[in-house]
């Protein structure tokens, strides 16, 4: 077992060997990065509140729409995390990931509102 872990570790290091660079921590004070951090914290707080609401309405008619809203806030937090990592140069992601995540977040919120409207009618 230990040999497999060591071999896996060496393989991962060899595969991911890339030019080392340090994170740009000073970028956090720039307005775009600070706004991304603020949105990340707000999305995480909203996800926690949505999770608590899902626990309260568990099994009820509104449960599905709140679960969809929870998924939307999780996707929003994930997109802002990737944006912040790109701004701080911790690691870079392809340019299409953040817009796709924001599109998925918008779709989840729209579908959640659609489900809520359908249930309340």
Image (cartoon, rainbow, N blue to C red):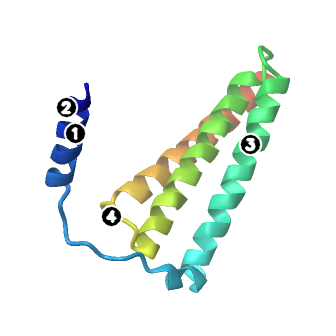
Q: Mark 3 points at which residue?
A: 48
Point out the image quarter for the N terminus: top left
Residue 88: horizontal and vertical position, in percent? 45, 74
Q: Where is 99 relative to 38, above or below? A: above
15 relative to 93 in the view: left or right: left
20 relative to 33 in the view: left or right: left
Whether pointer 1 and pointer 2 mark residues with C-beta atoms closer than 8 Å, the reply is yes
| Residue drawn at the location 63% of the way across and 33% of the way down | 68
Q: Within 10 Å of the Cα at label 3, are there few (<14), some (14-19), or many (20+) other Cα atoms?
A: some
Q: Where is 23 relative to 58, above or below? A: below
**Helix, strand or loop for disc 2:** helix
- From the image, state whether disc 1 or disc 3 is nearer to you: 1
How far apart marks 1 and 3 lie (CA) works out to: 38 Å
Which of the marked residues, 4 or 2, is nearer the chain's N terminus? 2
**Helix, strand or loop for disc 3:** helix
Whether pointer 3 and pointer 4 mark residues with C-beta atoms closer than 8 Å, the reply is no
The picture quadrant where one finds residue 29 is: bottom right
Which of the marked residues, 3 or 4, is nearer the chain's N terminus? 3
Which of the marked residues, 3 or 2, is nearer the chain's N terminus? 2
Q: Mark 1 points at which residue?
A: 6
| Residue drawn at the location 17% of the way across and 60% of the way down | 17
Whether pointer 3 and pointer 2 mark residues with C-beta atoms closer than 8 Å, the reply is no
**Helix, strand or loop for disc 4:** loop
- From the image, state whether disc 4 or disc 2 is nearer to you: 2
The picture quadrant where one finds residue 49 is: top right
How far apart marks 4 and 2 lie (CA) works out to: 38 Å
Q: Within 10 Å of the Cα at label 2, are there few (<14), some (14-19), or many (20+) other Cα atoms?
A: few
| Residue drawn at the location 69% of the way across and 37% of the way down | 113
Q: Name the residue under label 2.
A: 3
Closer-to-camera residue (29/3): 3
Q: Name the residue under label 4.
A: 95
Q: Within 10 Å of the Cα at label 1, are there few (<14), some (14-19), or many (20+) other Cα atoms?
A: few
């Amino acid at each position: 077992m230990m040999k497999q872990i060591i071999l896996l570790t060496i393989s991962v290091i060899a595969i991911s060997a890339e030019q080392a660079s340090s994170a740009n921590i000073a970028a956090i004070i720039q307005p775009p990065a600070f706004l991304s951090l603020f949105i990340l914290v707000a999305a995480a707080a909203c996800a926690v509140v949505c999770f608590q609401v899902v626990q309260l309405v568990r099994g009820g008619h509104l449960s599905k729409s709140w679960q969809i809203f929870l998924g939307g806030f999780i996707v929003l937090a994930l997109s802002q995390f990737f944006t912040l990592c790109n701004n701080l140069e911790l690691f870079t992601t392809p340019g299409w990931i953040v817009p796709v995540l924001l599109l998925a977040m918008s779709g989840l919120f729209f579908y959640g509102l659609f489900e809520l409207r359908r249930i309340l009618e």
